[in-house]
Amino acid sequence: MRKLGLVRDIDLALHLPLRYEDETRISRLVDARDSDVVQFEAVVTSCEITYRPRRQLLVTVDDGSDTCVLRFFSFYPSMQKALAVGTRIRGRGEIKGGFLGRTMMHPTFKPAGGELASALTPVYSTVAALPQAYLRRAVLSGLGRADLADTLPPGAANTRMTRAMWDLRRALDFLHHPTPDVALATLEDRSHPAWQRLKAEELLAQQLSQQQARRERDHLRAPVLQAQPGGLHDKLLAGLPFALTGAQQRVGDEIAADLLRQIPMHRLLQGDVGSGKTVVAALAATICIDAGWQCALMAPTEILAEQHFRKLISWLEPLGVRVAWLTGSQKKKERTAMLALVQSGEAGLVVGTHAVIQDLVQFKNLGLAIIDEQHRFGVAQRLALRGKMTEAGQEPHLLMMTATPIPRTLAMSYYADLEVSTIDELPPGRTAIVTKVVADTRRDEVVGRISAQLAQGRQVYWVCPLIEESEAVDLTNATQTHEALSEALPGTMVGLLHSRMPLAEKKAVMTLFTSGAMGVLVSTTVIEVGVDVPNASLMVIEHAERFGLSQLHQLRGRVGRGAAASACVLLYAAGENGRLGETARARLKAMVETGDGFEIARRDLEIRGPGEFLGARQSGAPLLRFADLATDTELLEWARELAPDMLDRNPGLAARHVSRWLGTRAEFLKA
């Protein structure tokens, strides 16, 4: 029971059925169609054990309208007795037609007679060794004991939204045991008034906990960070070889205003691939360093961290800022030197991977923590970085960045505790990327296209999903592709990059590609984020049907960074019938139809649902079990409006509501 999270009476009450079985009526076998699940009463006319093709118990029954063979592959002697010839039984199972007549595999059965069920029978999700019968009894008793008193504040029930809803006790009683006259479609699509009540309560609990986390943070203190006139911030702006876009200026101002407050900033900076988030982060860092505090930037991979490191050094070291570098692969001597720079405060900016949050790392005075691709980090890692502040009673400001734009409904729910800044325009000069979906039977044409690009002095990425042969998944691996392209493109340097290579090798390959010496880079998804080579104009993604939508969009964003016209080819495995699965087809269609990261994110949410979309924020975040952000926007708006008012006027009810729905999980939302 604990494995299923069923430890309180309310947990049992909220453990809703996966589906229902109709045991309220007896059907005639002759009326049943193939694949119908039916309940029947019939007399056993034969019962025998056969051994072909394997040991099985075959029982023929006749209900007066038709006959059916019940087939059991696992059975006990007691079953044979219960199914003796002449016995009248009540059975239930799925009818299958066939050459030798109708059959049922492993139906349930008991002696005929007795009352029929008055409601549909619930079937619950369970784990091994926990039978349905036990779970049904446990849920029923938990439902009886659970405190289901209304926690909606007085007046909340009189809105147009809530008038159509049932009260919680009635809704739960009904959903565990619906009456047979209910339209099953309203239970399956969760549009029934009973479902509406549960979804509304769940969304309200989520909004309350997020708003509460935000209010609790308002009582914390952070250093006031102010840019100095003519200081680092102004110098960096003046020294940049490009002008900021209007969107970059706007979000930069939003961040600067946050840093001026004594309350810790908790801001998510979202912007499409290549929209220029790094320079906004650098400007925020200069404000922090100007004010006499240290700034840390943490990235999920060493390649991405090094990209940031190089860029930031080129911008900040000419201004006299010392930038330290921390990763897990550093030699001991270099690492010790870097740790000393961080501890003394000599390093104004510290860039690195997870190594930044290790115990050995001691900051002199951390004022701003920047986390790139924040969804790659778990709750514990984000909390660890915030815990590096050494001043008692203070927290650093926190800026999280993501190139996976957050759809509006997600921002309203899972990110309701954050301020969200959006860079919604690309820098001038960025070219639109043409995207083509091509069957892998046309590989030769794609290689020809690569030759044409190379002849123009351009560079090409070729991305593969696997590194080595897998018997389970027949995919062309990166090593084979590297060999094939090297052969097909004589005179061109073709590089190979994957996650199992030693770091020194990875760096050497990336240096060759960045410098332009290497024409084609065959890679796994190591290059998904952060790699910036303006001369690369063609991206080929092998087995594109196996990638997620946001990952495809991230990969596509590696090209189109210069002035040259760029293209992305999505190669898919045509297979025997040349057809793609429905989900893969929807993903590739979205990629062809739009290059807008926000539209891509919206469609990704539709295809995958919020659980997968959120990535590592899941570790701790209580995902919605009942509400669906794609269809329940109106309920979400209702919960969002009600939550702050409820916290102000009815804090006791709010606390009870959150406790009922989230238990201890509400704590995780503070990260």
Image (spheres, rainbow, N blue to C red):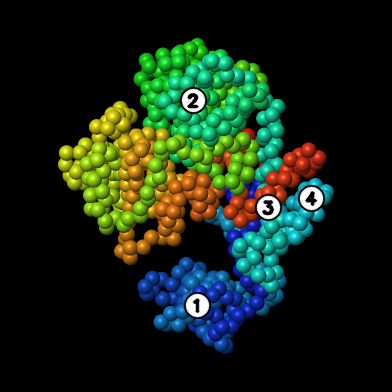
The residue tagged 2 is: 282
Name the N-terminal-most of marks 1 and 4: 1
Labels 2 & 1 near each other (Cβ < 8 A): no
The residue tagged 3 is: 635
Labels 3 & 4 near each other (Cβ < 8 A): no
Q: As displayed, is residue 579 above or below residue 279?
A: below
Name the N-terminal-most of marks 3 and 4: 4
Distance in Å between CA atoms under marks 2 and 1: 66 Å
Q: Nearer the viewer, mark 1 or mark 3?
A: 3
10 Å neighbourhood of mark 2: few (<14), some, or many (≥20)?
A: many
Seen at 51% across and 84% down, the residue is 67
Seen at 50% across and 33% down, the residue is 245
Residue most toward the right? 154
> Which three-letter amino acid code belongs to the residue tagged 1?
Asp
The residue tagged 1 is: 34
Front residue of this view, candidates 567 and 512: 567
> Which three-letter amino acid code belongs to the residue tagged 3?
Leu
Q: Please, what secondary structure does the residue beneath circle 4 have?
A: helix
Q: Residue 411 location in percent, x, y?
A: 60, 43
Distance in Å between CA atoms under marks 1 and 3: 40 Å
Q: As displayed, is residue 176 above or below residue 233?
A: below
Labelled disc at residue 167: none
Front residue of this view, candidates 316 and 562: 562
Front residue of this view, candidates 633 and 62: 633
Labelled disc at residue 156: 4
Name the N-terminal-most of marks 3 and 2: 2
